[in-house]
Amino acid sequence: GGVAMFLKEAYGLGTATGVFAMLMYVSMVISESLVARTFGSYVLQIINLEPLSFWVPALGVVLLAVAFLVNIAGNRAVQASQGVMAAIKVGGLAVFAIAGLWFIDVANFTNGSQGTGSVASGGFLAGIALAILSYKGFTTITNSGGEIVDPHRNTGRAIIISIAISAALYIALAVMVAGNLTLDEIISAQNFVLAAAAQPAFGDAGVWLTVALAIIATASGVMASVFAASRMLAMLTSMKEVPHRHFGMPGTLRTHAMVYTVAFAMFLTVALDLSRIAALGAIFYLVMDIAIHWGILTRLRSRIDVKPAIIITAIVLDVIVLAAFLWIKASQDVLVVYVSIGGILLITIGERLFMWSHTDATGAMDM
């Protein structure tokens, strides 16, 4: 609940906190559905099933159901599964990077201008928006603060260590890919660019290794995201920022939140394609991120150790990236822009009506 707690401290309990926290929650669920569909795409590389339009979302829904069962089994089951899968995917990606770096061709680093694609600043900034979404997963750590030993000390450490490991792997893999493939080869390989870049080291087995790692990575990502998103929804419910109905279901509030979270993710997995899911998640997350930074800068500066220059820089970069991303999407897929605006308006109106209908003249909430 780290994001929700920051919003509550900055804006107080009310519509603003509810809206921005729900944007964060929705972006988390969107990420779940994005990763679930990616899981389906990779599984179908080793299992020949047709039609893809059915089996990709179907396999994503199956993964979400399994993630629900693992999370229902308890924190120990989640911790054990996550520990094993994290070790496999980090170790596997490190092996890919190290092996591929031995075969890089320095000439490939200067071949970008020879590709068939075009380079535009707007497209580059739009790409950054999606890259920011990939780092959003680190908020999972703050949502799991209650499960961390000595959270005041170790939460920050966990975030820094995780980002450092991931950034090192991302950079090493990017260098490995750029050094082994031309730009046209990278574009052609698309989702299997790691396998193509590792072919000098692993041969055709690189495809199978890539698929295996991708399946493990996506499965563990969905399990972790279900855990974090359901905890956040349960916290927002406890804070009386969102309504709650159990509809006769047994179990705790957190169990109910998990059911709603997984059901929502399943709906998105079936209803939207990968590119649109990613775009919506990036837009919602960037809007929420700007709100977080603004609240810290204007309302919490006197209470916590804030470096204004860093916060202002983050806000400016968020605004630039969001504007570029919206501009690109408006010219390529305007439906994404309409849906994102509609989603934000729907959340805002829903939160406002909820607050209005459940608050009496003294400010107390009837829940």
Image (cartoon, rainbow, N blue to C red):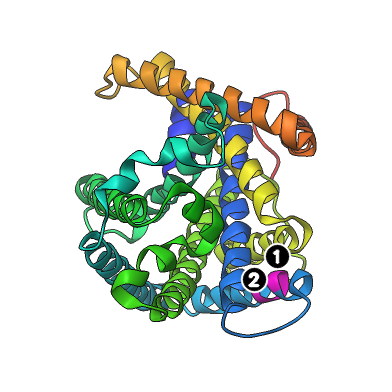
Q: Is residue 57 magenta?
A: yes
Which labelled disc corresponds to residue 227? none
Query: In the picture shown, does residue 332 fall above or below 47?
Result: above
Residue neighbourhood size for the residue with mark 2, other residues' Cα within 10 Å, grouped as few (<14), some (14–19), many (≥20): many
Q: Of helix, strand and loop, which one carries label 1?
A: helix
Task: From the top left corner, tell me how far across and down residue 191 is, in percent.
Answer: 53, 61
Q: Is residue 231 magenta?
A: no
Residue at (48% x, 55% y) in the render? 185
**In terms of secondary structure, what is the magenta stretch mainly?**
helix
Q: Nearer the viewer, residue 218 or 362?
A: 218
Judge left or right: residue 44 versus residue 159: right
Asked whether the residues under the numbered discs 1 and 2 touch, taking CB atoms below 8 Å apart as contact, a structural biologist would say: yes
Quadrant in the rendering for residue 298: top left
**Residue kind at label 2, given as amino acid type:** Gly
Bounds of the magenta span? Answer: 56-60
Residue at (74% x, 39% y) in the render? 336
Q: Nearer the viewer, residue 208 or 169?
A: 208
Mark 1 or 2, nearer chain start = 2
Residue linked to disc 1 = 266
Residue at (70% x, 53% y) in the render? 244
Residue linked to disc 2 = 60
Task: From the top left corner, tell me how far across and down residue 190 is, in percent.
Answer: 54, 58
Task: From the top left corner, tell me how far across and down residue 181 is, in percent.
Answer: 39, 55
